[in-house]
Image (tube, rainbow, N blue to C red):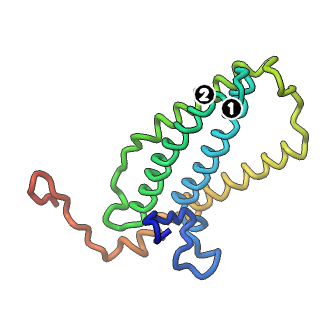
């Protein structure tokens, strides 16, 4: 990556850590939630792409399908860069509490919700997909995974209180520089 000048993204917070238990994703609720959110967005994007071309009877190698893929590629790059910048700002004591406007994330969520709505609306008698009930192994596998992820997030957020650990490690003793507005310092 250094050869062509691309930035390396460390979503899991592995850089400089010696063991898996030290990774930031396992010790910070905000990063853990961000990584889970990224997995959900990618999964929903792939599923809606498949379900929409099936429900609307669009050939896989057609102009609308390829245009959707290009738009999602460009939008995905912007949104993932924005999300990663949010994580990096949170790791910095000077910008930890600064609000970041999610200018590209909200339209992305809206597009995903719209694609889900189209997929659900035109699901019946759509063509290739036959309505089969979900097997118990698949259902309970997803249910257990969901419960474990929600429990671990709650554990990091409210039981272990990882914000307090962050403040004790980085913020305490660190004097925040005053913000400048219109060339004047405000305290």
Helix, strand, or loop for circle 1?
loop
Residue 75: give x, y in percent of width and height. 49, 41
Question: What residue did someone put label 1 on?
Answer: 61
Q: Quadrant of residue 123?
A: top right
Query: Eyeballing the image, is 135 above or below 147?
Result: above
Question: What residue did someone put label 2 on?
Answer: 63
- Marks 2 and 1 sit apart, C-alpha to C-alpha, by 7 Å
Residue 151: give x, y in percent of width and height. 67, 55
Residue in the foreground of this view, choosing between 146 and 69? 69
Residue in the foreground of this view, choosing between 3 and 184? 3
Q: Quadrant of residue 133?
A: top right
Is 39 on the left or on the right of 170, as rendered? right
Is 180 on the left or on the right of 117, as rendered? left
Query: Eyeballing the image, is 115 above or below 35?
Result: above
Mark 2 touches mark 1? (CB < 8 Å): no
Helix, strand, or loop for circle 2?
helix
Residue at the extreme bottom: 18
Q: Residues within 10 Å of mark 2 (few under 14, many from 20)?
A: few
Q: Quadrant of residue 158?
A: bottom right
Q: Residues within 10 Å of mark 1 (few under 14, many from 20)?
A: few
Q: How many marks?
A: 2
Q: Quadrant of the C terminus?
A: bottom left
Residue in view at x 52 percent, y 31 percent: 110
Residue in view at x 69 percent, y 25 percent: 119
Q: Which mark is residue 90?
A: none
Query: Eyeballing the image, is 143 above or below 23?
Result: above
Residue 163: give x, y in percent of width and height. 47, 63
Residue in view at x 49 percent, y 48 percent: 77
Residue in view at x 51 percent, y 37 percent: 108
Residue 147: give x, y in percent of width and height. 73, 50
């Amino acid at each position: 990556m250094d050869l062509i000048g691309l930035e390396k993204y460390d979503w899991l917070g592995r850089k400089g850590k010696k063991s898996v238990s030290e990774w930031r994703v396992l010790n910070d609720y905000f990063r853990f939630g961000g990584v889970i959110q990224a997995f959900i967005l990618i999964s929903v994007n792939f599923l809606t792409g498949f379900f929409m071309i099936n429900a609307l009877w669009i050939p896989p190698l057609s102009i609308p399908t390829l245009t959707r893929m290009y738009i999602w590629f460009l939008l995905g790059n912007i949104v993932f860069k924005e999300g990663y910048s949010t994580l990096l700002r949170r790791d910095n004591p000077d910008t930890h509490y600064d609000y970041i406007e999610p200018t590209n994330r909200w339209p992305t969520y809206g597009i995903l919700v719209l694609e889900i709505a189209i997929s659900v609306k035109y699901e019946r008698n759509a063509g290739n997909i036959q309505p089969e009930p979900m097997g118990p192994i698949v259902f309970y596998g997803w249910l257990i995974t969901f419960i474990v992820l929600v429990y671990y997030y709650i554990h990091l957020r409210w039981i272990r209180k990882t914000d307090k650990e962050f403040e004790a490690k980085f913020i305490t003793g660190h004097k925040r520089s005053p913000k400048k507005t219109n060339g004047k310092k405000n305290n």
